[in-house]
Amino acid sequence: MAKIIAGVGSSHVPAIGAAIDNNRTEEPYWKRVFSGFEKSKEWFTKTKPDVAIIVYNDHASAFSTDLIPTFALGAATEFPPADEGWGPRPVPVVQGHPQLASHIAQSVILDEFDLTVCNKMEVDHGMTVPMNLVMGKKNPDEHWPCPVIPLAVNVVMFPPPTGHRCLMLGKAIRRAVESYPEDLRVVIFGTGGLSHQISGPRAGLINSKWDKNFLDNLTKDPVKLSKIPHIDYMREAGAEGIEMVMWLIMRGALGDNVEEVYRFYTVPASNTAVGHIIMETRDKPKPSARKSSARKKPAASKRAVVAKSKAKAKPRRAAAAAKKVDRVRS
C-alpha cells in the first residue's frame, strides 16, 4: 500500500529560480534565503521518497484565459520546463508517474472531485523552483531524485477554489494514495505565497503576522484556516496571497496527526514573503491493552466491594434496630 509520509510547504518566487540559474545564490541578498533550505535538502536526501506530488499554480504557461481548469492533474510520463518568456529554465525534464497519477484521478473523480487530466503539460517556475529549493540544483542533463505528479490549481483567475475545498481535496488524495497497491512512500508539496502583491497601489505588501499565524495553524488547526474567505486573503495577504489555499491541499493529504520538523521564514525575496515548512505524518497512538485492563479492573473491583459491603451491612443494621427496640421495650 502506498502512503503519504510527509508534506512540504514552500514559496515559489520566480526570482529565486533566476538566482539559481544565474549562480547568484551566494550573494548577500540571496544567501539568507537559500541557507534556510539547506536542512530541507538534507531532510529530502535522507527521506528518499519514491514519488512527489507537487501542488502549484500555472503562470500562463500550460494554460491561459482560453482554458482555466480549477484542478489539473498531470498524468504524463514527462513534463518539460515551459518557456516563460526567457526560454525554458535550465532544469531537467520532470519525470512523471502515470500509473499512480491515473489511479489518483480515478479515485478522486469517483470521490466527486472533478479533475482535468492532462496527458501532456509543460511546467513552470511554480513547480520547479520548490523542487530546486528542496531537491537541490540540477542541470538539464541530470535527473530529479524521484518521479513527480503535478497538480495545477487555478489561483490566478476568479473564482479560485475555497480553502475548505482544497482541504477536502487533500483528504481525497490521501484516500486515493492509500488505495494504491504498490508500496510507495509519497511526499506532497503545497507551494505558492506567502503574503505578497506584485501590482497595484499595494504592490510590495507583506504581512508577517498573518504568515506566521498561517504556518502555526497549518500544523495545529487546518480546519480554522479552511474557513478563511477569499476576501480575507486579499485584504491581509495581498492579491497573490490567495496562493496559500494550495498549502491546504498538502495539509489535508497528511491526516490529523502530524509533527512539524522544520520551519523557515524570511522577508523579502523579490517583494515576497518566503515561507517554508516540513511536516511528517504520525500514526495514531494505540492504547495499551495492559493499561486499559488495569483501568477497568479497579472500577469492577470497587463495584464488587460496594455491593459486598451493602450486603453485609443489611444484617448488621437489622440486628442493631432489633436491639434498639428491645432496649426501648425494657
Image (tube, helix red, strand yellow):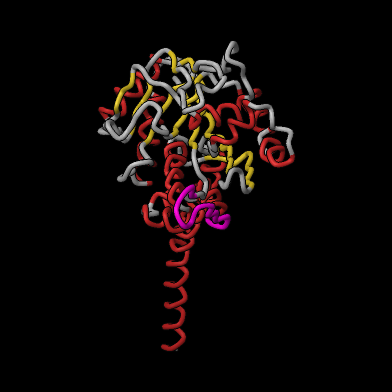
In percent of the image, x 29 and y 29: which residue is there?
115
Q: Which residues are magenta?
A: 197-210
| Residue 209 inside the magenta-drawn segment | yes
Name the spot of residue 23 as percent of width and height, x first. Answer: 68, 27
Name the spot of residue 108 as percent of width and height, x first. Answer: 31, 28
Name the spot of residue 118 as percent of width and height, x first. Answer: 33, 21
For the stretch drawn in magenta, the main secondary structure is: loop
User: Based on the displayed image, in which of its 4 quarters is residue 112 positioned?
Assistant: top left
Whether residue 29 is visible, yes or no, is yes
Quadrant location of the N terminus?
Answer: top left
Front position in the image: 109 or 310: 109
Relative to residue 319, is residue 162 depicted above or below?
A: above
Name the spot of residue 253 as percent of width and height, x first. Answer: 44, 35
In percent of the image, x 49 and y 39: which residue is there?
192
Relative to residue 279, is residue 105 depicted above or below?
A: above
The furthest residue to the front: 86
Front position in the image: 29 or 116: 29
Q: Number of labelled discs?
A: 0
| Residue 132 inside the magenta-drawn segment | no
Quadrant location of the C terminus?
Answer: bottom left
Front position in the image: 163 or 144: 144
User: Based on the displayed image, in which of its 4 quarters is residue 14 positioned?
Assistant: top right
In percent of the image, x 58 and y 37: which residue is there?
278
Whether residue 282 is visible, yes or no, is no
